[in-house]
Image (spheres, helix red, strand yellow):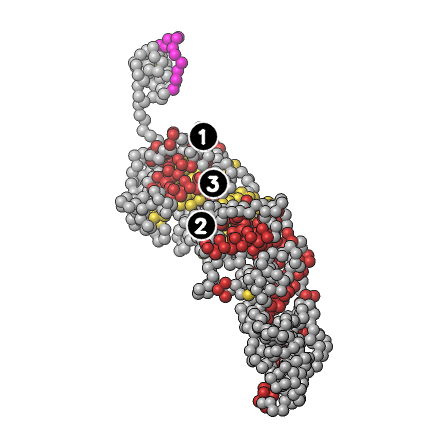
Amino acid sequence: MNYGDPSSSRGRAQIPGPNGDPGGSPHGNGWSTAPEGGASARASVPARGSASGGRASVGGAAPVPRGGAAGSASAGRAGAGRASVPVSPAPGGASGRAGAGRASVPVSPAPGGPAGRASVGAAAVGSAGRASVGSAAVGGRAAVARAGVPGMAGGGPGGPGGPNGPGRGRGGRGDDPDAVARAKKRRRINILIAGFAVFIMLAGIGVVGFTYYSTNVILPEDTTPPLATTIYSADKKVIAKVGDQNREFVAIKDIPQWVQDAVAAAEDRNFYRHSGVDYKGIARAAWNNFTGGDKQGASTITQQYARNAYDNLQQDTYGRKVKEAILASKLNDRYDKPTIMQHYLNVIYFGRGAYGIQAAAQTYFGKPAKNLTVAEAAVLAALIKQPEASTTPGGHKGYDPAVNKEAALERWNYVIGGMITEGWLDAPGKPQHPTEYPLKTLKKPNSKGVGVDFGINTPYGNVINYVSQEMRDMKLCTDTDTEVTPTRPLCAQALAKGGYRITTTIDTKVQKAALEAAQRATKGSELNGQPKNLMAALVSINPKNGRVLAYYGGDNGTGTDYAGKNYDNGVISGGHSPGSSFKIYTLAAALDAGKALDSRWKGKAFTPEGTKFKVSNAGFDNPSCGNSCTLEVSTLKSLNVPFYYVTQEIGPDKVVEMARNAGVSMMWQTDTNPPKPHDLTKENPKDLAPSPFFHVVGYGQYPITVLDHANGVATFANEGKYNKAHFVMRVEKQDQQTGTWRPLGGEKLNPQQRIKKDVVHDVTSVLEKYPAAVNRRLEDGRKAAEKTGTWELNEKTLDNGDAWMIGYTPQLATAVWVGNAGPRKKIEDKDGNKISGAKMPGAIFQRFMNEALKGEDKVDFPPAAHVGDPESGNGEAPPPTAPPVPPGCPDPLNPFCPPVNGNGNGGNTNPFDPRPGGGGGGGGILPTTAPPRQPY
């Protein structure tokens, strides 16, 4: 029985497809059909002793002269399903026949002979003489009959109707002795062929029987094909798709009936009627392959599903064909047609890297399968036969409309015609057939955004890497083979085969703002057109929950991540020296230790005792505040010397601890090669300072990641309440029986008050003055707290190697780094200017924050708390200075003016005047109606 052609009738032959390709589906090596009304394709060989010596060619019957009868050849009987090779009638013969299922060797009867039949081992010659080869039934015996030769009674040219008249005697007196010898030789060959045919049948039946009863059918739910994982942004946009194959499972209830019917019309029009296997097709394919024709196989939808779903059925062997048929039969017994159709539509390949109907609908039409029209469904169904061009020179170009439009249209019409013929269109209750090919909705091939691993080679690639890590942290996958379960695969394979739906924290609007400001490849960005050694990284976090809204650490997920950690053969890298931007943690640690913003510290350069390095203030030794610099001024002027002294006094471990509490998870010591990482979440800060992290930690020598710095800044933006930075909001997996999605895990917010609010308020009160100091104010008067940082390239030059800008509003915390892509060099812009924190990083930060915060409310920071002791520093007290004289003084009636006459009552009587009073005098004269006193 043939499948897939509306013009086929039972018994028509299968012929190879166009350009020599086998017909039917490329997945099935299937048959295509002969044209309507065509004769069965039959292979015949000339009969022994045939006077004419002619033969009937494959695919046609030899002409039959008037009065001729048909000869037939049989090798015993075989049960239904056994292979047969039809006979080509002799010229003039009536219709030859081969019993259903008989294994026959074709014979061409002699011209003009009546209805004689010749079995294997005999050639009928002339009239009704007949020789047979016993019964070839399984388990029986085959008796080899004599072969008729010219001159036998009833046979050959010497028999009735022959040229020599009737009644020639046995032995053929007067005949050619060579003809007799040739006949004997042919008889021996035919005996061998017959024996081999019997052996093949017996062996085949045994293999089929053994395989059927020994093969356990693995259920479709246990043979889930690789499914792509789709990764979404927080605003529900697809940002990446990862997997071995671009496939999304879709339940049959979400596949319109006309989509199912279109596929059946294209691949298997008897799908709803047959038992899942085309036995005659298998027999024809076996004979064709055995006789040297193109390899062929059956093409029912059930068999195609079995072949594509089971790994051990991918090899092109006869054993595979048998097992495929058995599995298809058992699947047909176990499952109903909708279930089989569901699994078929989820495994079959549609071209352009799309496996399954859901991925195909998205790839070709940009919509889910449930929204496909009839016309679009027919386009996809037409692709299955050959979705891509053949690799054989001159082979078929396939049915992708973008590659082979004419053939695609012809195939589309074939599918639509089949749907109409089967009553699936234009019938009562059925859709109407479309009249127009859906070119308007058809998408062009897009090599950059189609198929598996879409997103890996984009800036979202690093987000995917973090998604994988967080799935490990959620215990949704494992790195240990012994811990693998059906619900907990290996992490290395989870995203590639698991078919998850993962919603990330990324906001595409905020991400776009990050790329427009920081990515070199984005036209008009701050790095566009700059020296090629420069690289930028940016991370932005929602302080209220720790969600990473934007992440740019590089242009793909396979190279270096400049914003986070990199793992290479057990070595962890990725940190950059934060310079003065790290001082926010030192300042907070000082305030937490009881120091005050107005405490005074020495600011002149010096060489610490027992060391050989000099501590200075970014190249100048004597700041304007000298050795009496307040913490606030030291922060705003970014002085190193006061922060060295602060760190020395409170202990460098307190600075490391504050950074850890804010969100810095790793720091690298710089006296090793390569720099050695230290996990602050696992190591005690007391064990890390002052060695390896010395007092210079106070002003940012030791590298940290951009992600960690952004997380730390977010804690300050959230008034000291820490939320771990994360990328995953929700992980779901589909139930492949119902099609519903069930949650597997997601974010678990655990806010912790790690820094005192009053400490954070004082830090913020200083940092919100910084935008004006470096000329990086945000638009519309929006308040922001900012801090720059720059670290030298090396100790011998004043060139810069790393530059930072960090900052926050109550809604958004951001860290920006600019440095080298590759070996460390001095960082300069295209005009040769040194890059410091306030320059390129400041420009990126300012531009990004303005764009990302558009439409957000302007929110003020809480006021300063003024914690700590103003007398707690090591600096010198400022020299006394006379305060300015209030306007209108001297005036005895103005209480704000210093007294001009006293009577020795002990000095200055104005409590709001900080100047010391004079001695003696009788006190000032104050009117009883004086205005309220106010401070200066």
Residue at the image point whose x is 46% and y is 63% from the top: 395
Q: Nearer the viewer, mark 3 or mark 1?
A: 3
Q: Quote the CA–CA distance across marks 3 and 1.
A: 18 Å
Task: Please give the label number shown on residue 444.
Answer: 2
Q: Residue at x 47, y 40 (%)?
A: 507
Mark 2 Cα shell of 10 Å, populated few (<14), some (14-19), many (≥20)? few
**Res 226 visible:** no
Q: Which mark is residue 857?
A: 1
Callout in the foreground (2, 1): 2
Query: How many discs appear?
Result: 3
Question: Taken as a whole, is the magenta stretch helix, strand or loop?
Answer: loop
Magenta segment range?
925-935
Q: Relative to 886, does residue 430 appear above or below in the rendering?
A: below
| Amino acid type of the residue tagged 1 in the rendering | Asp
| Residue 777 appears in view | yes
- Residue 765: image x %, image y %? 41, 31
Mark 2 or 3, nearer chain start: 2
Residue placed at 31% from the left, 46% from the top?
529
Q: Which mark is on residue 507?
A: 3
